[in-house]
């Protein structure tokens, strides 16, 4: 009997999942870059790079120049420009490694995406309830982050990255309890 260390198992998302991560992240990265150009334009009183001042309710101005728009002392758009490269690199790495990558890699990646999901929701909350405005470009970043997060969650759970698949574990347990078989 061969004992296989579960930590040495490798995982690889399907091509469609990896491409979805790339597309969502590229759109969010591009919008983050445009928001950065808008931020620089507002600081220098230059012509806006992107038009986002549609009405008093739908505008970027109050969000970009506020302390909440500069969470770590620099514009939040820079966070997007740096952090949205992570899912792109992970997806390209998955496509380039036919043997897959170990569970710890995908767990760290999933936690990274969870952090981005939480950060985006915090930005959305502050934009809506503190500033009373909606930045259309920020909303596009939100709309890219949400399916990115849920697709990562769905894939890691389905693939068993966090351990046994919950459905499989429940099935094996039920089969073992009822019929005395199912576990090896």
Image (tube, rainbow, N blue to C red):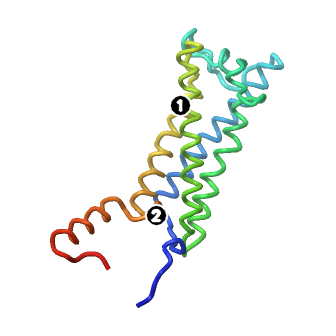
Count of numbered circles on the image: 2
Would residue 179 be found to the left or right of residue 71 on screen?
left
- Assess disc 1: are there few (<14), some (14-19) or many (≥20) residues with their C-alpha within 10 Å of its C-alpha: some
Would residue 140 be found to the left or right of residue 167 on screen?
right
From the image, tell me which residue sits under label 2. Answer: 14
Closer to viewer: mark 2 or mark 1: 1
Please identify the quadrant where the C terminus is shown. bottom left
Dividing the picture into quadrants, the one containing residue 55 is: top right
Report helix, strand or loop for mark 1: helix
Task: Tell me the residue at 64%/51% (across/down).
Answer: 86
Dividing the picture into quadrants, the one containing residue 75 is: top right
Dividing the picture into quadrants, the one containing residue 67 is: top right
Would residue 54 be found to the left or right of residue 149 on screen?
right
Image: 79 above or below 174: above
Image: 63 above or below 27: above
Task: Tell me the residue at 66%/44% (across/down).
Answer: 83
Task: Tell me the residue at 81%/16% (across/down).
Answer: 45
Q: How far across and how far down the image is residue 73, in percent?
A: 78, 28
Q: Are marks 2 and 1 in contact (CB under 8 Å)?
A: no
- Assess disc 2: are there few (<14), some (14-19) or many (≥20) residues with their C-alpha within 10 Å of its C-alpha: few
Q: Residue furthest left?
A: 178
Numbered circle sitting on residue 121:
1
Q: How far across and how far down the image is residue 19, in percent?
A: 52, 56
Q: How far across and how far down the image is residue 23, in percent?
A: 55, 49
Please identify the quadrant where the N terminus is shown. bottom left
- Compute the Cα span from label 2 to label 1: 28 Å
Report helix, strand or loop for mark 2: loop
Q: Residue furthest right?
A: 44
């Amino acid at each position: 009997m061969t004992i296989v260390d579960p930590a040495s198992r490798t995982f690889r998302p399907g091509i469609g999942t990896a491409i979805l991560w790339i597309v969502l992240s590229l759109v969010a990265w591009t919008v983050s870059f445009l928001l950065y150009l808008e931020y620089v334009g507002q600081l220098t009183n230059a012509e806006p790079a992107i038009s986002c001042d549609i009405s008093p309710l739908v505008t970027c101005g109050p969000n970009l120049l506020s302390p909440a728009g500069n969470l770590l002392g620099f514009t939040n758009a820079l966070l997007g420009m740096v952090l949205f490269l992570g899912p792109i690199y992970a997806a390209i790495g998955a496509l380039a490694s036919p043997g897959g990558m170990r569970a710890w890699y995908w767990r760290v990646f999933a936690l990274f995406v969870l952090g981005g999901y939480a950060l985006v929701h915090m930005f959305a909350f502050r934009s809506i309830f503190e500033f009373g405005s909606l930045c259309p470009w920020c909303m596009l970043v939100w709309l890219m982050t949400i399916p990115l997060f849920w697709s990562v969650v769905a894939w890691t759970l389905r693939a068993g990255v966090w351990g046994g698949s919950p459905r499989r574990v429940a099935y094996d347990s039920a089969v073992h309890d009822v019929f005395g078989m199912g576990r090896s």
